[in-house]
Image (tube, rainbow, N blue to C red):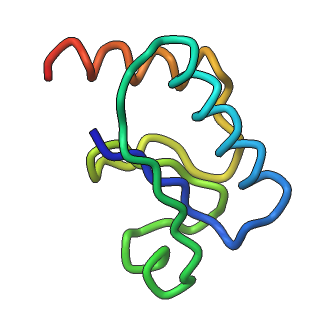
Amino acid sequence: MRIEVLGPGCMKCQTLLRNVEQVLAETGIHAEVAKVTDVFEIAARGVNRTPAIAIDGELKLQGRVATVDEIRGWLVGNSATQ
């Protein structure tokens, strides 16, 4: 599984990354976590507002920080199929 946090590295982006890391630590799910900060790559993926999060290439949310519960829901459902 690959999780990408898309954004320029602002405080909201950092919070989203911490939330992702917290969920991974709590659930024991193994995933590659990447920060995507290049604005051209972010725009090419159709992201209009940051922060954003993509899981295995699928954009899950943009424009706000996903909660720990939201991320857990995406990851637990996704890891069950892997």
The quadrant where residue 49 appears: bottom right
* In the displayed structure image, the side of residue 11 where residue 16 appears, left or right: left
Residue at the right extreme?
A: 11
Residue 50 image offset from top left, x and y in percent: 65, 61
What's the residue at 27%, 46% (across, down)?
A: 56
Q: Is residue 25 above or below residue 57?
A: above
In front of the other: 50 or 33:
33
Residue 28 image offset from top left, x and y in percent: 44, 16
Residue at the bottom extreme?
A: 40
Q: Is residue 57 above or below residue 27?
A: below
Residue 12 image offset from top left, x and y in percent: 79, 51
What's the residue at 56%, 53% (across, down)?
A: 52
What's the residue at 51%, 68% (across, down)?
A: 36
Q: Which quarter of the image is occupied by the N terminus? A: top left
In front of the other: 15 or 30:
30
What's the residue at 36%, 37% (across, down)?
A: 31
In front of the other: 57 or 26:
26
* In the displayed structure image, the side of residue 79 where residue 25 appears, left or right: right
Residue 69 image offset from top left, x and y in percent: 61, 14
- What is the count of numbered marks? 0
Q: Which quarter of the image is occupied by the C terminus? A: top left
In front of the other: 51 or 75:
75
